[in-house]
Amino acid sequence: MTSNTCARILWTNTFTSSLVMDALRTIGVDSFLLDDSCATADGKTRPLIQWCAYDALDHELTMQSPTSVLSSSFVIRKALIRKHYLHQTFVNYLAKHPKSLLFQSVPKTWNLDIAFSDELDELWGDELWDLAEKLDANSSKLEQNKLDSDIHMNASDVDWFILKPGMADRGMGIRLFRTRDDLQQIFEEFDDHSDEDEMDQEDNGHFTSVATSQLRHFVIQEYLKNPVLIDPLEASVTGENEGAGNRGQERAENGGRKFHLRVYCVASGALKLFISPNILALFAAVPYRNPSIDESDDIQTTLAPHLTNTCLQDSSDSENSVRLLSELVGCRILSSDDPNARLTAEDIDNIVGQVSDVLAESFQAALESPIHFQPLPNAFEIFGADLLITHNLESRGSSQFTVNILELNAEPAIEMTGARLKWILEDLFKSTAKVCVQPFVDRLCSESSGGRVNKDSGDKTGSWPAGETRFKLRKCLDVEVRSAASW
């Protein structure tokens, strides 16, 4: 590496900064800029690694200096990280590729552009006409159940839906509903917050309400009613393996919890995609129960069994709610009809394979929306993908499970991983440095000195097939959309 190459590191938290610096040191980079000072020398751009938060990056420098500047984020990637853009990305892609695996892995979704609750009336006859039919059918069922005491409805007899703000994160603004009136009530609540400039404290004391007029963009998704349920107390956690059988007895009383997968994926250049095999399982704070069909229930206070975002949990709960997917081997599948069903190593391998394929196809879909996703040869980025495992009720394919993609997040809340699993973040950042940054450093070193490129460089794409794991990353996708030579 040339002596004048340095790394500019700017994050709002010291935890991420320390991960970045430690990772860069492993590949020989130890010259750091920790402020927003200009990275120029003698009027020319000096070789620079920008590993910063998106808002701290000099995006103009990234675009102007493709051979001497490497940045830790793509400039344009709304097609992936905004829920309403991601939905439209999938809609456009599936229209052209109807046999894509995403057809089975993307929940039915509606986009919603609304500033105030009274705008819903117009949307029912336009963008949301088919959703209105489903909600009206629910209303009829609920009314019939209320009038006829001989009818005993189950939660599965009613279709539930989940509302999510398109640009919010950490569980903000998420709501469940099953009728038009429910949704109207939710947006009226959001209207009140817009008017009063205050937020309610809900879901174990955490603020989750939003102001509609400040967000406007929402998505509505069909609620997936058949999630795989596990008791995290039954997992074989490192250092706690003894007594696993006893925890299995405790599990019978606690019940299974809903969980989603947090997958850290690394996109590099234009374009290669990798995932960390250390996939997290993030559990809800309380045992799962189906959404209630009782109209006397306050649907806004029953979110805890359904929300698996650990940002909404107290610190004592969140420590018990984070497990590695691999730690779930041997856990009983409490949502299975078979009381003896357990997750096997083969199940985990199948799930990881599905995750890899779904994310590869998702990024492929984004590549076909070039206005809203533009990968750059001199950029890389770490994303946090959220996916949900459901039972494969239709028995399609060879797996009893289906992996459903929910969303992708830029600058994911890595601090929620917890102290016990901090090592997976250290591995992630070091692997990212090895695979995404070291080829850049080696090229600069080779150009400046005529020396040989480091043989341990992660830039071995020609011999690294998709599906293979190297440097603690599994490659999912390798396509060439734009080469550095074309700049």
Image (cartoon, helix red, strand yellow):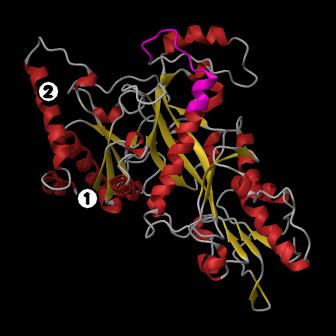
SS at badge 2: helix
Q: Is residue 256 visible?
A: yes
Mark 2: amino acid: Lys
Q: Which image quadrant: the N terminus?
A: bottom right
The answer to which of 193 and 79 lies nearer the viewer is 79
Q: Which residue is painted at 52% across and 13% down in the image?
A: 341
Marks 1,2: beta carbons within 8 A: no
Q: Is 46 left or right of 13, judged from the image as shown?
A: right
- Residue 66 sits above or below residue 437 on the image: below
202 part of magenta stretch: no
Q: Position of residue 102 (x, y in %)?
A: 42, 45
The answer to which of 50 and 467 lies nearer the viewer is 467
Label 1 vs label 2: CA separation? 28 Å
- For disc 1, the neighbor class at 10 Å (few under 14, some 14 to 19, many from 20) is some
Q: Is residue 32 visible?
A: no
Magenta segment: 336-350
Q: Main secondary structure of the magenta part?
A: loop
Q: Position of residue 474 (x, y in %)?
A: 67, 45
SS at badge 1: loop
Q: Which residue is painted at 49% across and 40% down in the image?
A: 387
- For disc 2, the neighbor class at 10 Å (few under 14, some 14 to 19, many from 20) is some
Tag of residue 141: 2
Furthest residue to the left?
A: 147
Give the residue at mark 1.
114
Q: Which residue is painted at 63% across and 83% down in the image?
A: 64
Q: Which image quadrant: the C terminus?
A: bottom right
Q: Which residue is painted at 80% across and 68% down in the image?
A: 441
Mark 1: amino acid: Ile
Q: Position of residue 428 (x, y in %)?
A: 71, 48
348 part of magenta stretch: yes
